[in-house]
Amino acid sequence: MAANVLRFALFGKEFQAGKTVSIHWLIDSLKARGAEIYIERTFFRYITSALGMEVEVSGVFDNYNFDVDFVISIGGDGTFLRAASMVGSKATPIIGVNTGRLGFLADIHPDEIDHAIAEIADGHYAVEPHAVIMVEADGEIIEGSPFALNDIAVLKRDNAAMISVRTCINGEYLVTYQADGLIVSTPTGSTAYGLSNGGPIIVPDADILCLTPVAPHSLNVRPIVINDDSEITLEVESRSHNFLVAIDGRSEKLLESTRLTIRKAPYTINIVKRDSRSYFSTLREKMMWGADHR
């Protein structure tokens, strides 16, 4: 029987105390199925100290130091992205419980927790691999993780004038963007920052990347889709002589002399999808398509 015990690592963030019921539901549902529960230390401190919850767990861990069957992210898509960065190349499947707002990645509603855990425990789920991209900086060190599940963007700083982004694909010159920035997004990230800047929605299993300018100076400049095995090189010019690189929303300042190379990472992030849900049904729900025809 011990061999069948499932192990779960929980990631979360500080949020309104009113949402503690979702944490209770999740932990109770896992315990009811005899699961081993491990909680990331910062989240554990929050729910036990700040919220005063009494939680019996199998262990508490820091950062990447976990070895489990599933990771559960409880929060919004930001929490999910943080969990994905901790999973990295481990290939541990991630389950997203959405206590945030829109939630394309974290798509299990709190009311569905017990049913969803039951389905997963019974093996009624699929594991969907999602492409990851990475960035390398020539001349500077990127302090945080260089890997992104959603997108990597170069952006102007604060109220500085627009930047120029000289862009090459596989060594061939494409265009120099005059814009507030440029987003390179995976299919997963197509419903994030890229979408808010007019980029296309891309199905998760499409082997492509999308380059979307942010507030371009020319109306002739449009998003472009390329193969995901392409190598993208970016050289930035700015009046402030520096710019930001944002990796799944984590931003760092770089000098304009820094040359960036973006390519597909050597691993994927595995996301758990329930058999009872599909990508298109989630898309319809989150985008509120046909809301007046229900």
Image (cartoon, rainbow, N blue to C red):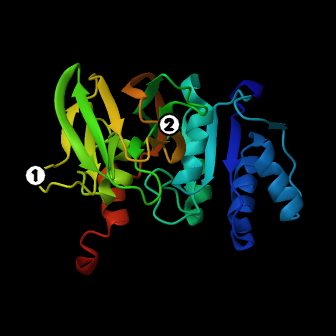
- Of residue 128 and residue 12, the one placed in the foreground of this image is 12
Residue at the extreme bottom? 292
Query: Label 2 belongs to which residue?
Result: 254
Query: Real-space Cα distance between discs 1 and 2?
Result: 28 Å
Circle 1 packing at 10 Å, graded few (<14), some (14-19), many (20+), is few
Give the side of residue 68 with respect to residue 52, left or right: left
Q: Do we see residue 183 in this rendering?
A: yes
SS at mark 2 in the image: strand
Which residue is rendered at x = 60% and y = 34% of the image? 144
Look at the picture and state if 194 lies above or below 101. above
Which residue is rendered at x = 20% and y = 55% of the image? 217
Residue 106 in percent (x, y) is at 51, 53
- Of residue 48 and residue 208, the one placed in the foreground of this image is 208
Quadrant in the rendering for residue 159: bottom left
Look at the picture and state if 133 lies above or below 78. above
- Of residue 143 and residue 280, the one placed in the foreground of this image is 143
Which residue is rendered at x = 55% and y = 49% of the image? 96
Residue 125 in percent (x, y) is at 47, 41
The label shown at residue 220 is 1
Quadrant in the rendering for residue 169: top left
- Of residue 153 and residue 277, the one placed in the foreground of this image is 153
Q: Do we see residue 95 in this rendering?
A: no
Of the residues shown, which amino acid type is indicated by label 2?
A: Leu
Look at the picture and state if 242 lies above or below 216. above
Of the residues shown, which amino acid type is indicated by label 1?
A: Asn
SS at mark 1 in the image: loop
